[in-house]
Amino acid sequence: MKMDAVDIWLTILMLTGIVLVLRNLFLFAPRRLQPRGMFERALRYAPLAALSALVGPEVFREALTAASFEWGQLADARVLSAATLLIVARLSGSVVGGLAAGTAVFLLA
């Protein structure tokens, strides 16, 4: 299927509009329509769950596709940086610090 430039830009603009409306739906909805209770608490973890679902398979790809487990797979730069990020973010309480430490380990490994 081949699309011309107008169709591509129209698709991008429509998807941008849909994303903006859905992401801001709860901000502008009346209080009686806003999520409450357990659903509201679950929405707080949605970005972290989405990020984990995107990054997790890439981090553990070598270990998941290998025929057998080897300890050398844990020395992969992706695994080391992810572990560093989790440890630093948990101990310091700073996600930005964890990201900086994980990036530094990834670049140095």
Image: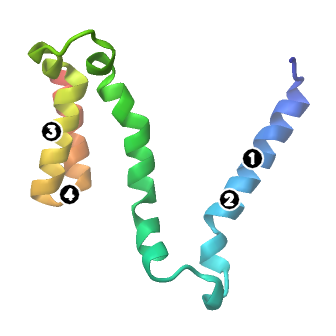
Does residue 64 appear left or right of residue 16 in this picture? left
Q: What amino acid is at disc 3?
A: Thr
Residue 109: where, in percent of width, then height? 15, 20
Q: Earlier in the sequence, mark 4 or mark 3?
A: 3
What residue would you read off at disc 3?
84
Give the numbered dot on residue 94. Answer: 4
What is the secondary structure assignment of the residue under circle 4? loop
* Residue 72: quarter of image: top left
What residue would you read off at disc 2?
20
- Furthest residue to the top? 67
Q: Nearer the viewer, residue 43 or 15?
A: 43
What is the secondary structure assignment of the residue under circle 1? helix
Q: Earlier in the sequence, mark 1 or mark 4?
A: 1
Residue 78: where, in percent of width, then height? 25, 25
What residue would you read off at disc 1?
15
Does residue 12 appear left or right of residue 42 in this picture? right
Residue 51: where, in percent of width, then height? 41, 45
- Furthest residue to the front? 68
Residue at 20% in and 32% down: 81
* Residue 31: quarter of image: bottom right
Vertical comparison of 26 with 57: above or below: below
Which is in the foreground here, disc 4 or disc 3? 3
